[in-house]
Image (cartoon, rainbow, N blue to C red):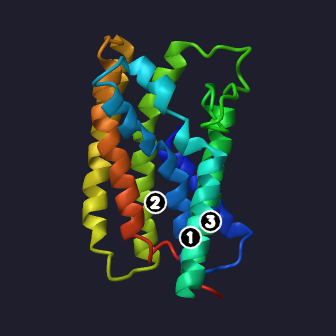
Amino acid sequence: MPQAGLHAAFGNQFRRFLSHKTRLFPAIIFGAILPDLDVIAVAIGSIFITIHDAETILHRTFSHSFFTLILIYLFFAIWGEWKNNSTLKSVGKGLVLGMLTHIVLDTFFWFREIHFLWPLPIEPFNIWKNWPAPEWLHRTMLVLEFLCFRWYAWFLMQQHLKNPHGNSWLIKYLNIWMGWETNFLVFFALLAYWNPPFFKVLFGAAYIPSLIMALWATYMSRDALELKPI
């Protein structure tokens, strides 16, 4: 975090100054969303320990580490070299660039610590450590996740309309997804105002499917997200 849709939008800006390579830009956008998939590990961990402890141990750790980025880059570089496939190398570069933008945005706009060098026993970095963000701000940012998911569904629909491909049947389901995110936005805005103790549990139940949908929709929209060379 911050919002997955915001990460995707930021990753999409690489179009402005990077030359076109097959699958590079879809991979950047996918990679910009990917690190927050660690919430699934948090959800599983919360079965055995408290949500707070699960977040401390698992959130913004392995998926936000520079070592993970290096491993992903090397994996795709070696795979691409072995298969003599430049597209695989582009995918690796794109994923790493997207994940890097995610980490940068989290550093400045999530107000909490990040384990850049996980798993080394080094204190996590927090640029806001001298200003503890109020809890209402975090709840508000969580609610805005659904607004940004809604925007991202709209963005993908526009990409399919501008650059139609065989997977543009997805527009129908993106429109349904956008409607669900609107409902989540209204529901969690009211819930955040009430602030019950089970807020994070309900949020996770809605957020995880939304995040998986964002990643799946990005993958299925990879042709529509390609920047056509001039």
Query: In the displayed structure, does residue 66 sit left or right of residue 219?
Result: right
SS assignment at label 1? helix
Query: In the displayed structure, does residue 172 sit left or right of residue 94?
Result: left
Q: Residues within 10 Å of mark 3 (few under 14, many from 20)?
A: some
- Spot occupied by residue 86 in the image (x, y as percentages of width and height): 60, 83
Q: Residues within 10 Å of mark 2 (few under 14, many from 20)?
A: some
Tell me the residue that label 3 is attached to.
74
Gap between marks 3 and 2, in whole Å?
31 Å
Gap between marks 2 and 1, in whole Å?
28 Å
Q: Earlier in the sequence, mark 3 or mark 2?
A: 3
Q: For the residue marked with disc 3, what is the amino acid?
A: Leu
- Which one is in front in this view, the residue at disc 3 or the one at disc 2? 3
- Which one is in front in this view, the residue at disc 2 or the one at disc 1? 1
Q: Which mark is residue 117?
A: none
SS assignment at label 3? helix
Residue at 44% x, 67% y is 158
Q: How many marks?
A: 3
Tell me the residue that label 2 is attached to.
155
Task: Inspect this view and state whether residue 180 appears.
Answer: yes
Q: For the residue marked with disc 1, what is the amino acid?
A: Phe
- Spot occupied by residue 143 in the image (x, y as percentages of width and height): 42, 30
Residue 180 falls in which quadrant of the image? Answer: top left
Up the image or down, 141 lies above or below 174; here it is above
